[in-house]
Image: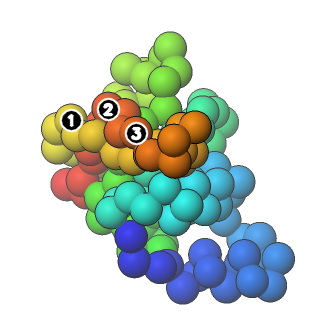
Amino acid sequence: MDTIDALEQQIATRKQVNSNTLLRAYISTQEAGNELLDFSEYIFDSALPGFTTELDKIGVTEFTISVRQSDMAATLIEITEQGWDLAGLTRVFERFTDFSGNRGKVPAFHLRRA
């Protein structure tokens, strides 16, 4: 994944502007080596109202969600109501490697700005 200057600057200076959800996703995406920003940790309902606004501000036009949470349908509906399309399903690298040093792949939803 290409770096996102606004997030890199926040990490380097430790002056957080964006949500924890977005920063954690960015860091874990970099560690996993995924092509698109991937949300692999729980997305709280309270984060959803400003979630896509943050993505727009930093220039993200597509991303994936690989988190395994029980209310994913509700989360996806909320995101699509904010102007994003479910582009399909894909697989992304896991953040951590297994005991042999290999990084597995997990299923993910692929979303794109409408």
For residue 6, above or below residue 91: below
Is disc 2 placed on a helix, strand or loop? Answer: strand
Question: Which numbered marker is on residue 104?
Answer: 3
In the displayed orientation, state which residue is furthest to the front: 100
Number of numbered discs on residues: 3
For residue 55, above or below residue 77: below
Residue type at numbered disc 3: Gly
- Please name the residue shown 34% across and 45% down the image: 92
Q: Which residue is mark 1?
A: 89
**In the visual, does 106 lie left or right of 46?**
left
Along the line of sight, the residue nearer the viewer: 86 or 90: 90
Of the numbered discs 1 and 2, the one sitting upstream in the chain is 1
Q: Position of residue 8 (x, y in %)?
A: 62, 80
Query: Dot 2, how many residues are within 10 Å of its Cα: few (below 14), some (14-19), or many (20+)?
Result: some
Q: Where is residue 7, by image quadrant?
A: bottom right
Query: Dot 3, how many residues are within 10 Å of its Cα: few (below 14), some (14-19), or many (20+)?
Result: some
Along the line of sight, the residue nearer the viewer: 47 or 107: 107
Residue 79: tell me if it is visible. Answer: no
Q: Position of residue 85 (x, y in %)?
A: 21, 44
Residue type at numbered disc 2: Pro
Along the line of sight, the residue nearer the viewer: 93 or 74: 93
- Please name the residue shown 28% across and 40% down the image: 91
Q: Which residue is mark 2?
A: 107
Location of the C terminus (image quadrant):
bottom left
